[in-house]
Amino acid sequence: MARTRLSVRRLLAAGLTVAATAAAALVATAGPAAAATTPGVDVSRYQGSINWTSARNAGIQFAFIKATEGTSFKDANFNTNYVNAYNAGVIRGAYHFARPNISAGSTQANYLASNGGAWSADSRTLPAALDIEANPYSGGYCYGLSTTGMRNWIQDFLNTYRSRTGRYAVIYTTTSWWNQCTGSWTGPWANHPLWLARWSSTPGALPAGASVWSFWQYTSTGSVSGISGNVDRNYWNGDRTRLIALANNT
């Protein structure tokens, strides 16, 4: 979700998500035209200083905030954004940009959990998100991994994050990348909410095996009071009450 990666990521994004089996009631099963949707954003250091009170007053109710990338990068604005969003009444979650070709999934999940991506039942903290998408660096679109290798990497990350936090991580991806690089793997959608990335007026096709979206990033050029320049805009597929239920794992 960094601004430097816009030219190579998510351009063919599409997908819907399924909520965790243990939390299936938390996710609306209807499309956005038939169910309440809750507005949110995702941000990183590229948005600079954010006035979270202004954003909340403008209707923003949740935010995914970049925490980590790979095994050594932590977003310079994460700590400030994470605390200030919470204090403004914004339900927040951390996200990790995956680098599957530089370390094991377990290593990166532990790095996330130790650097802001842990979870607490405080009504304003979502389980963290794994941002897994087209490789913006060298190493190929699928990071040089086979479909089996990619499935194993993702599962290693998800298992470790759950072991560390007790929560099923959200998965951010695109339909095109997911189906190509995992071989249309359906495994995670029984438990892990999918965060759809598709910049369009409709969610479009689902990743293999998914049946409903939980979060949908529908534009990269949104405008929000309190945030300078363009910002990714998102919906939660339900009302704030259900989002708080997801945050609290209830």
Image (cartoon, grey):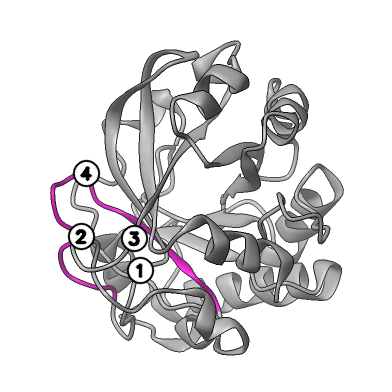
**Looking at the image, is mark 1 or mark 3 earlier in the sequence?**
3
Tell me the distance, in whole angstroms, between the alpha carbons under discs 2 and 3.
15 Å
- Between 148 and 163, the residue placed more toward the observer is 163
Q: Secondary structure at mark 1?
A: loop
What amino acid is found at the position of numbered circle 4 in the picture?
Trp
What amino acid is found at the position of numbered circle 1 in the picture?
Trp
Tell me the distance, in whole angstroms, between the alpha carbons under discs 4 and 2.
8 Å
Residue under label 4, please give it: 199
Do the residues bearing badges 1 and 2 touch, measured as CB atoms within 8 Å? yes
Tell me the distance, in whole angstroms, between the alpha carbons under discs 3 and 4.
20 Å
- Between 100 and 201, the residue placed more toward the observer is 201
Mark 4 neighbour class, 10 Å CA radius: few under 14, some 14 to 19, many 20 or more: many
Magenta region: which residues?
192-207
Q: State the residue at coordinates (41%, 24%).
A: 3
Q: State the residue at coordinates (29%, 74%).
A: 207
Q: Position of residue 149 (x, y in %)?
A: 51, 75
Q: Secondary structure at mark 2?
A: loop
**Looking at the image, is mark 2 or mark 3 earlier in the sequence?**
3
Residue under label 3, please give it: 36
Tell me the distance, in whole angstroms, between the alpha carbons under discs 1 and 4.
14 Å
Q: Position of residue 151 (x, y in %)?
A: 50, 78
Q: Quadrant of residue 205?
A: bottom left
**Looking at the image, is mark 1 or mark 4 earlier in the sequence?**
4
Q: Secondary structure at mark 4?
A: loop
